[in-house]
Amino acid sequence: QVQLVESGGGLVQAGASLRLSCAASGRTFSNYAMGWFRQAPGTEREFLARISASGGTRYYADSVKGRFTISRDNAKNTVYLQMNSLKPEDTAVYYCAASATSSYNYLYWGQGTQVTVSS
């Protein structure tokens, strides 16, 4: 079992930056690939970014490529999402999730953190 807790969300103006953190506990964090997702009201959960267990490989959705950066610190059992040039359409609840390294099936999810971007 892996427990995930997101933090760092809040209310910001368009153009601002935020860094989300996701702290993991339980099983060995460095054995898992990690992903960030978001869900706005009335929409389906959207994949944003994924980072491999070692941190050497990263993938991004086109909607955030060039603005968001995923990173991890295995010594701190934490994955981050740096979000720059935020837009009102980035408003959503943001979730981190963990998957086995060879799978895209995310087994463990955090409770989410709200990000609201005002225009």
Image (cartoon, rainbow, N blue to C red):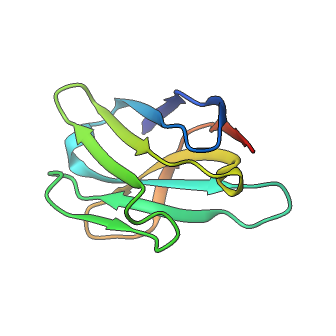
Quadrant of the rendered structure where residue 71 is? Answer: top left
Q: Nearer the viewer, residue 67 or 115?
A: 67
Q: Nearer the viewer, residue 3 or 7?
A: 7
Check the picture and name the quadrant holding the N terminus: top left
Q: Nearer the viewer, residue 2 or 9?
A: 9
**Residue appearing at x 48%, y 63% in the figure:** 64
Considering every residue shown, the one lying at the far bottom of the view is 62
Position of residue 47 relative to residue 2, above or below, is: below
Check the picture and name the quadrant holding the C terminus: top right
Q: Is residue 11 left or right of residue 83?
A: right
Position of residue 96 relative to residue 45, above or below, is: above
**Residue appearing at x 83%, y 55% in the figure:** 41
Residue 8 in picture, x, y percent from top left = 52, 27
Considering every residue shown, the one lying at the far right of the view is 42
Residue 50 in picture, x, y percent from top left = 36, 60
How many numbered marks are there? 0
Residue 112 in picture, x, y percent from top left = 62, 38
Position of residue 34 relative to residue 116, above or below, is: below
Position of residue 86 relative to residue 62, above or below, is: above
**Residue appearing at x 36%, y 30% in the figure:** 26
**Residue appearing at x 13%, y 58% in the figure:** 56
